[in-house]
Amino acid sequence: MRAQAEDEVGVAAKEMPNVQQISPVPRISIQAFCETQEVATIVQAAISDRRMNKAHVKLHMGGAPAAVEAYRSAPTPNLIVLEATHDRNALVGYLDDLSQFCDAGTKVIICGKVNDIVLYRQLMLRGVSEYLVAPFGVMEFVQAVSNLYTAPGASPVGRVVAVIGAKGGVGSSTIAHNVAWSIASGLDTSTIIADLDLGFGTAGLDYNQDPPQGIAEAVFAPDRVDANLVDRLLSKCSDNLSLLAAPATLDRLYDFPETAFDSIIDVVRASTPCIILDLPHAWTAWTRRMLVGADEVIIVAAPDLANLRNAKNMLDSIRSARPNDHQPKLILNGVGLLKRPEIAVADFTKTVELEPLAVIPHDAKLFGAAANNGQMIAEIDANCKIAEIFNDLARAITGKNDIRKAKRGLFEPLLAKLGRKRA
């Protein structure tokens, strides 16, 4: 019976796994809640393994009760690891409580001591990704984490957000850079900002970076693009934020075929939870491909007639190309410029048939100081209204809109089933 149970639960083999076949864990955030020093020691040792060096791991004690309490007021990471020494009913109860606060896309590994088929089935029903039965070793733990993201058929780690201006000079790059900063720092999420305006990109200036290499080295050598090359090209802006910088030089022409950036996007999407594409204001085959292929599209516009016309045209085109996706998102920027005639927000919204995700007021002093100092708005004044807007945008874009409300992310199969029964 025990042998049968181990086969069905998929307990990690007691022999050391083939470490050569364990793929590196991508740039995900992991939080582990342990109850015993034994498991905490294993997790701590796993953090030091070379295959985990890209992941951001935090270790806590207190098990499932501590996790429930922690996520009442904080966004959940990409992966939660819970050690459970409780009986079946208590563990399931804690998981049901935790499901109320988990964001979409969060995965869970349970580390337990009971080899119980009924418990395993209840956990799988609730969307738990893996159940490790003690005793297990460091490499077995690393392999379990790796398999969630690198096994054949695993969903891509990254969410691609494309940001483009409805007109040149409306501040789409500034918004893209500040939102990326808020996602990385405020939500503790590994983020890559890719500056795709190779001739005139400003991401290097805004982040006060001057990397010797950047995205041009990859796009002009597509056959060489792999994870190792991209890692070498990334410039680190903070613990969780990296930059693929544009060369911002005019010593060559930047005419690209439609699929020029596909290999780069595929590589970063496989290893990084959030990728922000800072697109130039242009309508070419490759920019349209980036917009149509992104998980989220954000159009930044100012409240004037040219922006209104362009935004409507872009929205209509993107909607028709993505009939089964979410609506593109609209941000109105620079609203309230003194003495400038503007189209009212309500009239703009009515014409484009889309409510703006955010309305950002004009503040020449604040944005000018940030641009000239190579800083983000939050670095200039973390408590100002515009910094709060960027934080709200970060939560909305990543699906962490309101951490106090239940979300259909973790344990989604059970929630959907319960919803059908109630209906």
Image (cartoon, helix red, strand yellow):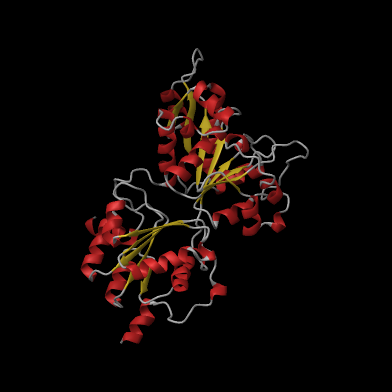
Quarter occupied by the N terminus: bottom left
Up-down relation of residue 147 to residue 256 (above or below): below
Quarter occupied by the C terminus: bottom left
Up-down relation of residue 31 to residue 36 (above or below): above
Whole-percent x and y of residue 420? 27, 58
Whole-percent x and y of residue 387? 43, 32
Direction from residue 117 to residue 146 in the image, left or right: right
Number of marks in picture: 0
Say whether residue 356 is visible: no
Direction from residue 332 to residue 212 in the image, left or right: right
Question: Residue placed at 50% from the left, 62% from the top?
Answer: 52
Say whether residue 212 is visible: yes
Question: Residue placed at 49% from the left, 66% from the top?
Answer: 146
Up-down relation of residue 180 to residue 159 (above or below): above
Direction from residue 402 to residue 205 in the image, left or right: right
Whole-percent x and y of residue 48? 49, 64
Question: Residue placed at 29% from the left, 46% from the top?
Answer: 405
Up-down relation of residue 83 to residue 325 (above or below): below
| Residue at the far top in the pictured view | 339
Direction from residue 126 to residue 341 in the image, left or right: right
Q: Nearer the viewer, residue 400 or 352?
A: 400
Whole-percent x and y of residue 385? 40, 28
* Quadrant housing residue 174: top right
Q: Nearer the viewer, residue 196 or 188?
A: 188
